[in-house]
Image (cartoon, helix red, strand yellow):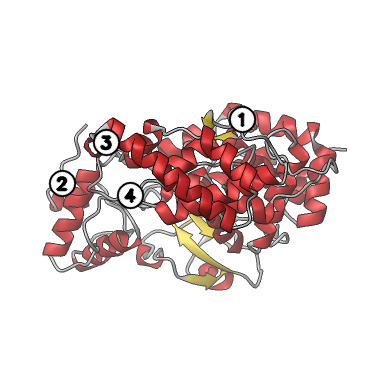
Amino acid sequence: MPVSISRLLRPAATALCAGMLAAMPLNASASLADKATDQPAALNSFETCKADLQQQAIAAGVSAETARSVLADAEYLERVIELDRRQPEFTTPFADYLNRRVNDTRINTGRQLLIEHADLLQRVTNETGVPAAYLLSFWGLETNYGSYFGKMSVPSSLATLACDERRKTFFTRQLIAALQIVDEGAISPEQMEGSWAGAMGHVQFMPTVFLKHAVDADGDGRRDLWNSLPDALMSAGQFLQSMGWDGDYRWGREVQLPENFNFALADGRRQSLQQWNQLGVTNASGGPLAEEAIDAALIVPAGHQGPAFLAYHNFKVIMGWNRSEFYAIAVGHLADRIAGAGGLQNPPPVDALALSRDNIMQLQQQLEQRGYSAGAPDGIMGPATRAAIRQYQITNGLVADGYPGPQVLRVLQITPVL
């Protein structure tokens, strides 16, 4: 029987994957010019580094044969370094981000898979507490339901990154974990393909996450996240459960805000639903919020003219998978849509400006000069920058949504390049 749609929609309803790595701040000074190195020297250094990695892997318990054979075949991938260094030229407005990920094709496919894999999904839900629509949402966002895992050799990608100084320690751990996965017989090194950063399989687990959370759900004696959907979805459920997924509640919900609402309250603070009710916040249809003893934070990802969401505990769990509010909203909204819900009552404006990193650095510098601490200018729109914008807005009688809208950009003399 299909999984109960009503159960998935009830109001009381790190991880390190590729998406998380994409959300990690990059050194703003890095550029593609950094790769202008002497190629023979780089390759010689890579061979020396691989020899050192081999000894570290053996010391960590990897068999000598696996460490030797896999690293002997690992190649230096200049493309991986380019991707690691590459700075996105423009930030992605929320509307673009959400509409690319939560589209009719992905929604309809998810609804079909909800029926097709009903028994498996119900089993994972029973064992982990994670509803089927969320499992499908993660699967859909990570690999478009298994249609694309990435084509990079994971041992080569991780060896390349482990021999690069920028995040050497982190990727050395990932490489050793990947060798341990080969050692246990989960997959051959030739078949171990994934993203440029080493994320693997249907749900794009990094190797250390694989070792800790991957499970053999189909009983074949192997933890196979590439070829076994039961293994992949159960592993995703187990991982979310380990981060504290609460199966009694949903991720959050879209809400409507009253006129003249104080957007300074959208600063990450968590308040009870009763408190939000008292402030005039309603559900998306205009009705009162549920009388549940839970806390929620208000999020306005596109500023005061876009949609507003109350984020519950499970929202924080989703961000344990990927440290991006946009990603977490996309997971939650796609899950809602797969489970039968309609679109947003207040869709995000599609004409929002895409700011370049240079624009954001200029914004941060302007705020600092005016006495609003946004942290070291790095071109990243993080919490400190949003807090500085909000304080500037409060001081200057603007809507304090912490969003760099046209009025803020105009006053601070920031001109986006169209």
> Which badge, 1 or 3, is on the more N-terminal residue?
3
For the point 74% across and 44% down, the residue is 223
Distance from the alpha carbon under mark 2 to that under mark 4: 23 Å
Crowd tier of the residue under label 2, counting other residues whose Cα lies within 10 Å: few below 14, some 14–19, many 20 or above: some
Q: Which residue is mark 2?
A: 414
> Which badge, 3 or 2, is on the more N-terminal residue?
3
Distance from the alpha carbon under mark 1 to that under mark 4: 30 Å
For the point 67% across and 34% down, the residue is 188
What label sits on residue 190 in the rendered view? Answer: 1
Viewer-nearest of labels 1 and 4?
1
> Which badge, 2 or 4, is on the more N-terminal residue?
4
279 or 239: nearer the viewer: 239
Say which element carries label 4.
Answer: loop
Q: Which residue is mark 3?
A: 35
160 or 321: nearer the viewer: 160
Distance from the alpha carbon under mark 4 to that under mark 3: 15 Å
Q: Is residue 288 above or below residue 188?
A: below
Q: Which residue is mark 4?
A: 26
Q: Mark 1 belongs to which amino acid?
A: Glu
Viewer-nearest of labels 2 and 1?
1
396 or 200: nearer the viewer: 200
Residue 240 showing in the rendered view: yes
Viewer-nearest of labels 4 and 3?
3
- Contact check, label 2 and label 1, Cβ < 8 Å: no
> Which badge, 2 or 1, is on the more N-terminal residue?
1
Say which element carries label 1.
Answer: loop
- Contact check, label 2 and label 4, Cβ < 8 Å: no
Say which element carries label 3.
Answer: helix
